[in-house]
Amino acid sequence: MSGLEKKLPPLALLLLFALLLQLTSYYLPSSNLHPTFSLGLAVSLLTAGLVIPLAGVLSFKRHGTTPDPRVPEQSSALVTSGIYRCSRNPMYLGFVLLLLAQAVFLNCLWLLILIALFAAYLQHFQILPEERAMQQLFGDSYRLYCQKVRRWI
């Protein structure tokens, strides 16, 4: 197990990367997206990036289990309904959509490289450790759920 696993709260990581995208965009060339298209796409991504994680948190609350990703071993229920029928990680999916919205709004598609690094970090240091904990807690039920529902989308 790596020393970085589940150490950095995903929301803090999101804010850190949002700042990094903002600062980096000043040094990268514009993507020349049409302003109307860019704004419409950014608003759509922003909306999805807010609604999807909120649906995930609300599902956890409805089932009385912790939404805190730093302590997956404290989960008291395996949530497979609602948004969790479409994605095993809707909160992280939403975070990626928020960063995509920012990149499109900044009209700098070069930022997709940083967003890919964000997703890779989440995958390695957050999602995989969470999955190990869920497998230990819920066994075959979790394994079957993983076979039915994709990790991201």
Image (cartoon, rainbow, N blue to C red):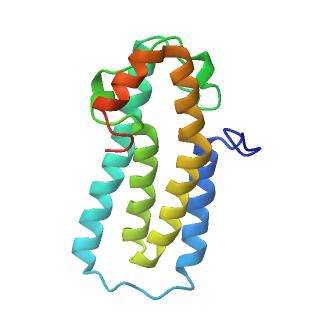
> Image check: 112 left or right of 13?
left
Q: Where does residue 136 sit, x and y in percent of width and height? A: 56, 19
> Image check: 119 left or right of 59?
right
Q: Note whether residue 108 is visible.
A: no
Query: Residue at position x 45%, y 59% from top?
Result: 99
65 versus 33 height, above or below: above
Query: Residue at position x 42%, y 37% from top?
Result: 89
Q: Where does residue 91 sit, x and y in percent of width and height? A: 44, 39
Which quadrant holds the C terminus? top left
Q: Where does residue 134 sit, x and y in percent of width and height? A: 52, 23
Q: Note whether residue 151 is visible.
A: yes
Q: Where does residue 130 sit, x and y in percent of width and height? A: 56, 32
Which is more toward the observer, 128 or 56? 128
Which quadrant holds the N terminus? top right
Query: Residue at position x 55%, y 39% from top?
Result: 128
Query: Residue at position x 22%, y 74% from top?
Result: 36
40 versus 127 height, above or below: below
84 versus 21 height, above or below: above
Q: How many marks?
A: 0
137 versus 4 height, above or below: above
The image quarter in which residue 23 lies: bottom right
> Image check: 50 left or right of 148?
right
The image quarter in which residue 126 lies: top right
